[in-house]
Amino acid sequence: MIKTAFSMAIVAFSLATAAPAGAQPDTATTAFETMKETVGIWRPVENPDSPLRIRFSLTAGGTVLVEEWTRNGQPHSLTLYHRDGADLIATHYCPQGNQPRLAMLPQADRSVIRFAFKDATDLDAMDESHVVALAFDMSDADMLVRRETYQRNDTDEKSELRLVRES
């Protein structure tokens, strides 16, 4: 009898604390949905003749966003974005041969999504450059601003790409 009453109390507590119907989605889901808006092919604003193109596409039933860089049509690098429970993860497959993983940082603004280094595979941190920070600013509907920080021997190198959709 006590065991049954205890079990019923746990069920009642679980129902009382469950998210109500229509509750707001978690931050990782919201950020991933925002990132899906990048699907398409992008080129640098400053140099329309640049051989660089960045293509965003969805795979795995829409659960993974693929960011593929090409130069003159040749593959350069790849970054995959996907959910991992309550987190949004980016795994960057770098031409240096390492694979840094970054986790999304808390968001203050839906249009800016930031990631920070979590860990990496096949990385020699003293000899290889690797991405340690990545951010997307989507506050301008006509432009995507992509910022990244690479690190080698504890020295940071920051870059920013201002991109527009290819016509």
Image (cartoon, helix red, strand yellow):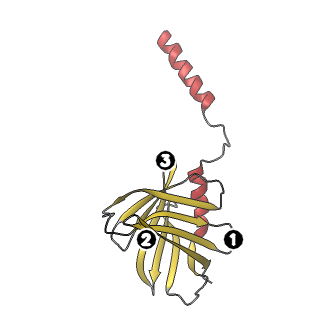
**Mark 1: secondary structure:** loop
Q: Which amino acid, mark 1?
A: Ala
Q: Position of residue 79 (x, y in %)?
A: 45, 67
Left or right, 165 with reference to 129: right
Tell me if label 1 and label 3 are in contact, CB under 8 Å.
no
Of the 4 image quadrants, the one containing the C terminus is bottom right
Query: Which residue position is annotated with label 3?
Result: 85
**Mark 3: secondary structure:** loop
Mark 1 residue crowding within 10 angstroms, few (<14) / some (14–19) / many (20+): few
Identified at 53% across, 71% down, the residue is 56
Q: Which amino acid, mark 2?
A: Leu
**Mark 2: secondary structure:** strand
Whichever of labels 1 and 3 marks the residue nearer the N terminus, that label is 3
Q: Which amino acid, mark 3?
A: Gly
Tell me if label 1 and label 2 are in contact, CB under 8 Å.
no
Mark 2 residue crowding within 10 angstroms, few (<14) / some (14–19) / many (20+): some
Query: Which residue position is annotated with label 2?
Result: 78
Which is nearer the eye, 59 or 161?
161
Whichever of labels 1 and 2 marks the residue nearer the N terminus, that label is 2
Q: Position of residue 5 (x, y in %)?
A: 53, 14
Which is nearer the eye, 30 or 106?
106
Which is nearer the eye, 26 or 121?
121
Asked whether residue 63 is in view, the answer is no
State the count of labels.
3
The CA span between labels 1 and 3 is: 29 Å
Tell me if label 2 and label 3 are in contact, CB under 8 Å.
no
Image quadrant of residue 163? bottom right
Left or right, 26 with reference to 121: right
Image quadrant of residue 141? bottom right
Identified at 52% across, 75% down, the residue is 55
